[in-house]
Image (cartoon, rainbow, N blue to C red):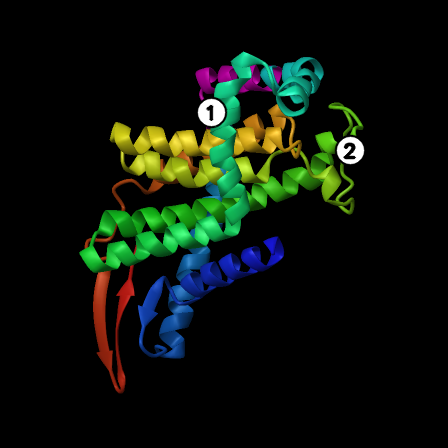
Amino acid sequence: MQKESRFIAWVWIAIIFTQGIGLSQTVEEDSSKSRAAKSLISTIADDFLHVVSSPRRMSKSDALRFTSFLALNVALIYGVDAEADEEFALEGHKAYMKPAEALAEVGDLYDRIGTARVIAGLTTTMLAGGIIFKDKKLLNTVGLMIESSIITGVITSLSKGLFGRSRPYTERGAQAFNLFKFSLGREYLSFPSGHSSSAFAMMTVIAKQYDQWWIKYPAYTLAVSVALQRMEARQHWASDVVVGGVIGYCVSSTLVSRHRGKTNNQPLIPYFAANQIGVRIYF
């Protein structure tokens, strides 16, 4: 079922991008489609390079924060991960854990639906709303969500294979890494958490685009609930979800900052041709 949902979502994403983020009753001319697809692919590739090269543009204060973050994760891996797994996932009866457990139940619903279906359903709904209400900010938000999900997914997948960390349920311990062994099974793909990175990627775009507290706080709360659920289910260690969340947050923050103010003045452009009528959506 999970593979099926991922297939559905990526087919939807592929359709959006190969059609130039467009919807029509008939197919446009091949040359127009080709130009739109090339433009979008070029944009995604350019944004991907911009994101992965971000460390080169860090200020001294950013470098200090990054170093502190690395130190925090080393501390989590060697001093907290195993204890957090035992107290939160295995025992789970201590009073101070109850709020986290309740929040993890929200994340459990996200997990049952599936990351791919959440991405596909949320972007489809928002896309429809953007078309109906001719809301170019909403349309731009959808484009950023899809792009951030793709870029975050690539970075997360490569990192999983690079580190080859054993999941908590394997009982191999929090320090069990198999570096550069990309061919190992899913039980060695713990670091970082893909659910956490994708949830934070989507929710960060929404929170950055719409800064109202009644949108921002629920968005981040949902992302945190997903991270907690992955720990409670013993799919990930605490450091896995922290790093995954930071990856999603940083990718989305970088994209939103880069594209802020670049929205097209005419996101909805109708077109007419021989036996063709439709509308193209530009972000």
Q: Quadrant of the N terminus?
A: bottom right
The residue that appears at 22% across and 65% down in the rendered structure is 269
Helix, strand, or loop for circle 1? Answer: loop
Q: Which residue is mark 1?
A: 58
Work out whether mark 1 precedes mark 2 in sequence or the reverse, and give the earlier one: 1
Around disc 2, counting alpha carbons within 10 Å, would you say few (fewer than 14), some (14 to 19), or many (20 or more)?
A: few
Q: Is residue 176 left or right of residue 45?
A: right
Vertically, is 79 above or below 38? above
Q: Which mark is residue 268?
A: none
Q: Position of residue 210 (x, y in %)?
A: 27, 36
Magenta residue span:
57-71
Q: Please, is residue 34 above or below residue 147 in the view?
A: below
Instruction: Return the residue found at the far bottom.
Output: 275
- Residue ID at (51%, 51%): 116
**For residue 41, above or below residue 166:** below
Q: In front of the other: label 1 or label 2?
A: 2
| Coordinates of residue 57 in the picture (x, y in percent) | 46, 29
> Residue 137: percent from the left, percent from the top?
25, 47
The C terminus, quarter of image: bottom left
Residue 59 lies in the magenta stretch: yes
Indicate the amino acid at tag 2: Thr
Query: What kind of residue is marked 1?
Result: Met
Question: How would you rate the neighbour count of disc 1 (Cα within 10 Å): few for under 14, some for 14-19, many for 20 or more?
Answer: few
Please give the label number shown on residue 170. Answer: 2
Q: Residue at x 60, y 53 (%)?
A: 2
Q: Report helix, strand or loop for mark 2.
A: helix
Q: Quadrant of residue 270?
A: bottom left
How far apart in space, not on screen, are marks 1 and 2 (Cα)? Answer: 38 Å
Residue 15 locus on image (x, y percent): 44, 65
- Tell me if I can see residue 51 in this picture: yes
